[in-house]
Image: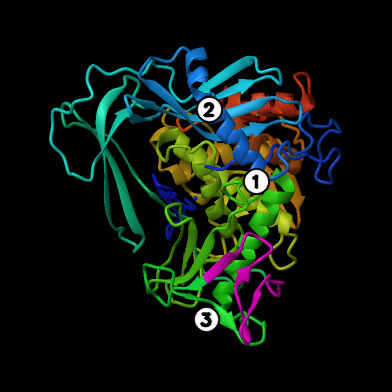
Amino acid sequence: MTPHMNTRRAAALAAVAAMVVVGVQTGAANATPGSSDGGSSASPRTASPAFSSASARTGAIKSAQTEAASAADTLGLGSQEKLIVRDVIKDANGTVHTRYERTYAGLPVLGGDLVTHTTSSGKLKGVTKAVKTRISVPSTTAKIKTAASARKVIWARGGTPVLAFETVKTGVQKDGTPSRMHIITDATTGKKLHSYEAIETAGVGNSQYSGKVDLSTTASGSGFELTDGDRGGHKTYDLNQGESGTGDLVTDDDDTWGNGAGDDRQTAAVDAHYGAAKTWDFYKSALGRDGIAGDGKAAYSRVHYGDAYVNAFWDDSCFCMTYGDGADNKSALTGLDVAGHEMSHGLTAATANLDYAGESGGLNEATSDIFGTSVEFFADNATDVGDYLIGEKIDINGDGTPLRYMDKPSKDGGSADYWDSAVGDQDVHYSSGVANHFFYLLAEGSGAKTINGVDYDSPTSDGSTVTGIGRDKAVQIWYKALSTYMTSTTDYAAARVATEKAATDLYGADSAELKAVDAAWTGVNVK
């Protein structure tokens, strides 16, 4: 899987050997003490959702927005700066985490996002900022001319804030994936400051995926349609090899869908619809989150995109997943962990909104791998059992090997096992290996072991031994870090701090879980 298309970018499933993705969360879900996959019996500090409904979360956001000016004053922001509330999370102990975007003189500040952390009594206990530099520019009048469609912004991610233009160029990438290239240009000198592809791709290949499954459908007229009334009304469409619009809603006469063969039109829709349902259920059950954006609203899926398109992607501008049919037009790219990966790009966009470049881009991709893997374990599907292999069912390499390995990422021939100062210069599909490896070590520990019939042997950078705390707790820590402490510019060092804070919130400052977080990061050379 690669880039994610929110209003900033999109997520796709790449045809290369690398799986390159404003809501309100209901609060951190309980990590089950003494779960079957290991870990200590310490109970998490946040044991239940703090918001009982989507309307309660909406009310929390509105209330926070009314206090935004006061919050800006408390934080010591300049007179021309304003805060816009994106998200509010309330822990069961009353701690409130409020995520803001920032404007300066009415212009969006790219890299201005921040999260405040307040006690139940309203006392500010800390703030996490994407950039620590004070936001100020000499003038908001541009000295260069640009396209009328360009958006004037303040670019803060480079360190020193500058007036800039954001231009979006659309087109098609070499493999047929849609392109939405964002280019940031200095509004004074015309110098290019930054660019990123808004389409995030991932791995794809041939598979029959999940076998016989139950689907939630809706009766319509004399037949049925792939509309999931149990999960926000998620719909699955057939694009009929088109590359725009939604195509046709998939329908059937007798509510028996597909035949498991790649040349059957409905089979791809079955896998996509099933993957979306399992991802929704995982978010609800494990994370206490009601859909991708936390507001109970469904995304939708599109299958049969393009001709021999070997990819899949998430696009936040349509809030949808899109899947190609593979090189032979018979191998739809709708594997279970692929669906979970793509939808989770949307989750990242709705929370930390990790910039899809440098180390934050690797963390973005790894987040989708972590949750895609977690969806696969959660589904407990006998045909596609849970494992720490990414895209193993889609056979992107044509030889039965998976796209990526979480226990030792370098086994794919390109991903990084450990952090070094150059890792941010790698393609985000490969730099993601550091976080994938961290997650595996945190969940399962180092050394040789067999899980669900798959052999793993995870090393550490310094030869240390890491004892895992179990996948359930590792997921809780990563999600809380993503949703409450990470920002758009979080790098690996900051990710360590974020997960340490999350583990402390959930399990305590002297917990085995926090010690395991530290040990796992040290094991991948993030110190």
Q: Name which residue lies at 48% across and 49% down.
A: 413
Distance CA(mark 3)–CA(mark 1): 36 Å
Identify residue type, mark 1. Ala
Instruction: Mark 2: give few (<14), some (14-19) or many (20+) Cα within 10 Å.
Output: few
| Nearer mark to the viewer, of 3 and 1 | 1
Q: Which residues are magenta?
A: 211-236
Assign a secondary structure to mark 1: helix
Residue under label 1, please give it: 54
Expressed as whole percent of the image width and height from the top left, the position of residue 264 reads 54, 83
Instruction: Mark 1: give few (<14), some (14-19) or many (20+) Cα within 10 Å.
Output: some
Distance CA(mark 2)–CA(mark 3): 50 Å
Identify residue type, mark 3. Arg
Expressed as whole percent of the image width and height from the top left, the position of residue 126 reads 59, 17
Identify residue type, mark 2. Thr
Residue under label 3, please give it: 265
Task: Specify whether 338 is left or right of 446.
Answer: left
